[in-house]
Image: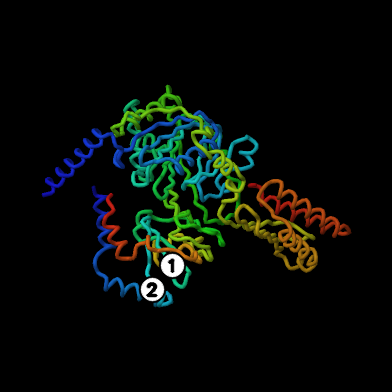
Amino acid sequence: MAASAIRKFSLTLFTSKVPFSSKVIASFQCQKRAFSFSKCLADRLYTDKHEWIVIVNGKGTVGISNYAQEQLGEIVYVETPALGTTLNPQDVSGCLESVKAASEVYSPVGGTVTEVNSKLASEPALVNSSPLLEGWLYKLDVAPGTNTKELMNEEAYKAFLETIVH
Amino acid sequence: MHVKKTLQQVAKSVLKLCIARCSGISTDLLPRRTVLISQSKSIYENLALEEWLYENANLAETEYLLMWRNHPAVVFGRHQNPWLEANIPFTRDREIDTARRASGGGTVYHDEGNLNLSFLMSRPRYNRRANLDLIVEALVRKWDIDLAVNQRNDIMLERFYKVSGTAARLGRSQSFHHCTLLMSVDQGMLLKSLDSPMLGVESKATKSVPSSVMNLKDKVPELTFELLSEVIGQHFLSGSHSPHNADKFEFIHPLDNIKYPGVDKILARLLSWQWIYGKTPAFTIHRKFVGVAFHELCTLEVVIKAEQGKLTSLTVALQNDIVKNKLDSFVQSTLSFYTNYFLREEVLLTPQSISDMQQKYSKIVSETFSNSPEAIQLAKWLSDSVTSCFNFV
């Protein structure tokens, strides 16, 4: 009972309708982390399994959502795909280990892996503390002709989270 | 208001249950349950079947409790370093299997006195705590013992001794939670198998948490694999709300390629060196040795780096300037030997591969410095030190 109340509360925090202040925080973080402005403006697209991807000029960056990291708890090991791996949409592309559980990550789109977040080898908990920025998992050259219509934008993903019943 | 809502919810679920019972249509809410008792005592075959079910079974329709026991084996988690978690030379001498699971968590030792349980369910129905509670409930009902699940999701006997280890694998729409249950495991072998001789290692691999363990048979002398799997299996089936009569026990063999097509391919991967050792997260070994060379006390530093079960670098450094100056050519040739060796050969962390490298080193040193007994002596010390760094292989 208490657990479900807490979960509901954290969900409410995440989906609370304060778009203005959250945007302010997001852009502040971008400046602080010296992320390019265009990256911040690009749409972050989500899967129904809580992975996200940002695509800029055919280059995709993949991570997991804040909701997903909350569900997993403290992440102790991050397995990323090997460079050069060719992924089809929904292929297993990595694995996150939290207390005693290994959770598989699925690629939101197809493509070829060009870079992995090497910081995660020594600091896996970055996925918890900064799932949308510093805790990104890998980058890929998105396969030509990729269709992102199946993926949800920020608004749709927030609405989707509201529908999840525990 | 609150009560009203709850009543409405109850009414709704009763209605759903009625519909399902009347029409006989399986719904997501009401999966069937099947208990599978494996006839195989191979850890690899049983893990292969578990993975086959995870990849291929419709777990939203039927959920499984797979149970087995296996020959002595050390089983480590998906992101662990086997050499750091177990005594690999000991397991090889005693013909104890070594296996890597696809689930997270720490290393466990199994023998035939251990019951393995794997709860295969759809991802939304994954509930580690409920499964452990089910096991405890089944045992406590049958026997009067003090068993409880603690905060770390371990089943504790008399609140102090761990009798079960837990781990899970979560996928897109499927999951499994598997655990061990110690009935009458050889505790001496357990301790020796899990006592790693590795020294000076730095690694980010998942670490095991050692615990005091106890066997359930010490409290329930009549306990056997058959009895325990029957008691827990029946309790698992009684927890099913499925309207079907398909809830049942099945005695199966994992390598049934007609029933489980492709299970042999999974088995081949689980048996491969590439999976068992090659998946090891990168690690570094840093060792220091003190000895005498050319009548001078000096320190030898050895740094070894490995990735994917292969050596990626090996450096040796003598920390004594007098010896270093006297033997500059010797130290340089030693270093260049290892550097060149790595450029030419792939050195896997296997006894054969390490022994080949060390033999070639000794041969080159004795050929190059045949006129200097002191140099040969130093080379032997150096070679022995490097070899001892690989005592874990």
Please name the amino acid that badge 2 sits on. Cys
Q: Quadrant of residue A135?
A: bottom left
Residue B383 shows in the view: yes
Mark 1 = which residue? A134
Q: Element type at marker 1? A: loop
Residue at horizontal 32%, vertical 65%?
A154
Q: Is residue A18 above or below residue B203?
A: below
Q: Is residue B242 above or below residue B205?
A: above
Nearer-the-camera pick, B7 or B205: B7
Q: Horizontally, is B199 left or right of A65 in the view?
A: right
Residue at horizontal 35%, vertical 30%?
B247
Q: Horizontally, is B220 left or right of B3 in the view?
A: right
Q: Is residue A15 above or below residue B174?
A: below
Residue A139 shows in the view: no
Nearer-the-camera pick, A140 or B37: A140
Residue B375 location (% of width, % of height)? 82, 59
Q: Horizontally, is B344 left or right of B349 in the view?
A: right
Mark 2 = which residue? A40
Q: Are marks 1 and 2 on the same chain?
A: yes
Residue B28 location (% of width, % of height)? 31, 42
Q: Quadrant of residue A17?
A: bottom left
Q: Horizontally, is A132 left or right of B384 in the view?
A: left
Q: Quadrant of residue B89?
A: top right
Q: Is residue B76 above or below residue B95?
A: below
Residue A96 location (% of width, % of height)? 45, 54
